[in-house]
């Protein structure tokens, strides 16, 4: 029997597509990722040491250089400056006299822990009053404790020292060509420095109407009146001599390239070389 159809048969329902890009699903996915990341971090920490703190790394430390080497002129100056003093003397008139007095300026160096000062004897000879000035601004009267006229050396005993006493390091012998530095008060110019080399050793210098000063160091670092008594220093910062004179064929008394210093061993009375220490005077 034939069945009559009134129209086409309806198509079957198509399956609905699930929407993934919804706020709710995105929120769930985000929470899941956070939880998974936290789990991974926990596993890593415990597998590396059970949650113990890692040992901190030590900071790098600079290693000392193999050798300090010779000091520059500026470094020598800074090293010795606290040990150098300015010396001012008054000569001529007595305290109650009305005549004019004469003042002179020289240099000295603190050479011992008791504050004793080495200088040239002619700087303080016949002085009525001696005043020493330290680089920190302290001043003090001083007296001559001992002297060596043959070598033009004197030791001063100040009434007081600077706030911080820094005795100089005393060195040994020198050779021709060694670098040297002079510090002093040439022509009254306080704490001036110059450098040069040792030009000769074991020189003899005749004094006016007196015997010769022997065994001197000849050098070409510039010195002038006022430099007398100051230290001659090697490139290790050690005092190797005490400046006592300069050579000048004229009456001008200015430097022409030749200065002389008493070796530090002779200045200390031993007649030999120093040993890099600060021996008693």
Image (cartoon, rainbow, N blue to C red):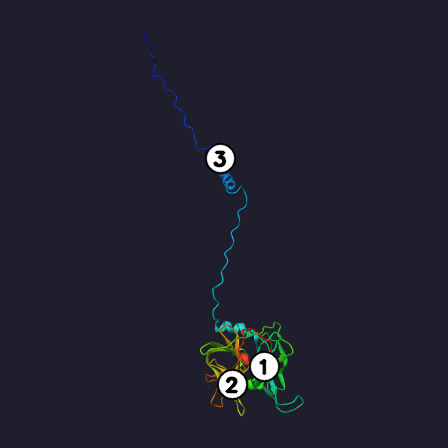
> Which residue is most to the right?
96
C-alpha separation, residue under disc 1 versus residue under disc 2? 25 Å
Q: Decide: marks 3, 2 in contact (CB < 8 A)?
A: no
- Quadrant (top left/top right/bottom left/bottom right) for the N terminus: top left
Note whether residue 230 is visible.
no
Q: Secondary structure at mark 1?
A: strand
40 lies above or below 195: above
Q: Which mark is residue 87?
A: 1
According to the image, label 3 marks what residue?
A: 32
According to the image, label 2 marks what residue?
A: 214
> Which residue is most to the left?
2
Residue 43's spot in the image, x, y percent?
A: 50, 39
Frontmost residue, 189 versus 58: 58
- Viewed as shown, does residue 140 lie left or right of 255? right
C-alpha separation, residue under disc 3 versus residue under disc 2? 99 Å
**First in residue order: circle 1 vs circle 3:** 3
């Amino acid at each position: 029997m034939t069945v009559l159809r009134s129209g086409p048969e309806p198509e079957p329902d198509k399956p609905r597509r699930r929407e993934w890009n919804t706020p709710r699903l995105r929120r769930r996915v985000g929470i899941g990722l956070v939880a998974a990341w936290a789990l991974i971090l926990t596993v890593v920490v415990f597998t590396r040491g059970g949650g113990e703190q890692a040992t901190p790394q030590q900071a790098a430390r600079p290693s000392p250089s193999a050798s300090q080497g010779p000091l520059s002129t500026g470094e020598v100056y800074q090293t010795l400056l606290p040990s150098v003093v300015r010396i001012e003397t008054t000569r001529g008139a007595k305290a109650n006299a009305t005549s004019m007095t004469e003042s002179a300026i020289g240099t000295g160096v603190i050479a011992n822990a008791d504050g004793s000062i080495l200088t040239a004897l002619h700087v303080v000879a016949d002085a009525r009053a001696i005043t020493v000035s330290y680089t920190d601004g302290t001043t003090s009267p001083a007296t001559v404790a001992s002297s060596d006229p043959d070598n033009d050396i004197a030791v001063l005993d100040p009434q007081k020292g600077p706030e911080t006493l820094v005795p100089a390091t005393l060195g040994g012998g020198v050779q021709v060509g060694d670098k040297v530095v002079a510090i002093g008060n040439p022509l009254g110019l306080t704490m001036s420095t110059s450098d040069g080399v040792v030009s000769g050793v074991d020189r003899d210098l005749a004094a006016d109407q007196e015997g010769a000063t022997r065994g001197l160091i000849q050098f070409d670092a510039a010195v002038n009146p006022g430099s007398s008594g100051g230290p001659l220093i090697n490139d290790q910062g050690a005092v190797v001599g005490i400046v006592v004179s300069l050579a000048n064929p004229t009456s001008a008394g200015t430097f022409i390239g030749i200065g002389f210093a008493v070796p530090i061993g002779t200045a200390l009375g031993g007649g030999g070389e120093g040993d890099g220490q600060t021996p008693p005077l």
